[in-house]
Image: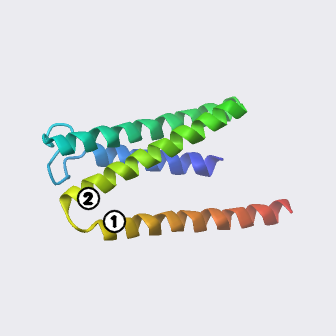
Amino acid sequence: MYIGLVTQCVSIILIWVGLCTSRWACGDLVRGCKSREYKNIHYILFAGAGCVSLAFLLDIFRCFCVKKVLEIIRLIVQFAGGVLMLSGLIMYYSLQSNQLSGFLTTMGSTAFIFVSVFGIADLVLLERIG
């Protein structure tokens, strides 16, 4: 459980730092990107970051109070945040260039690495328990 919290914390820090820096093609997402398309992407990305942050807070709260309803709400909010973040990034990269294929391949590879790491962790935990 603690590895998941640390991973979530690092991911959320990276997400917020990425959103708040001014190294986007249009500059700062909040003040620099003035066109309508970028404003929509801005709202989607910040909504996703908010959902992911809320899921992290629910996960911390879950450490002190174990309730099945809280677990289900956390998973729904976490999934919604991830989908919003990915949708916003796909929209952003589709506006920027024709290199959407490279972005999708990178995202898929990253997700596969996480699945592999969690699969290894499951094997290690099963060997210790069993």
Query: Callout 2: 10 Å neighbours few (<14), some, many (20+)?
Result: some
Residue 53 lies, in percent from the top left, at: 46, 37
Q: Is residue 29 visible?
A: no
Q: Are marks 1 and 2 in contact (CB under 8 Å)?
A: yes
Disc 2 marks which residue?
93
Disc 1 marks which residue?
103
Q: Is residue 72 visible?
A: yes
Secondary structure, mark 2, is: helix
Toward the right, the furthest residue is 130
Residue 122 lies, in percent from the top left, at: 71, 62
Kind of residue at badge 2: Tyr
Pick the front one: 80 or 60: 80
Pick the front one: 112 or 66: 112
Q: Measuring 39% from the left and 52% from the top, which residue is drawn there? A: 86
Establish if 77 lies above or below 102: above
Marks 1 and 2, how far apart at CA: 8 Å
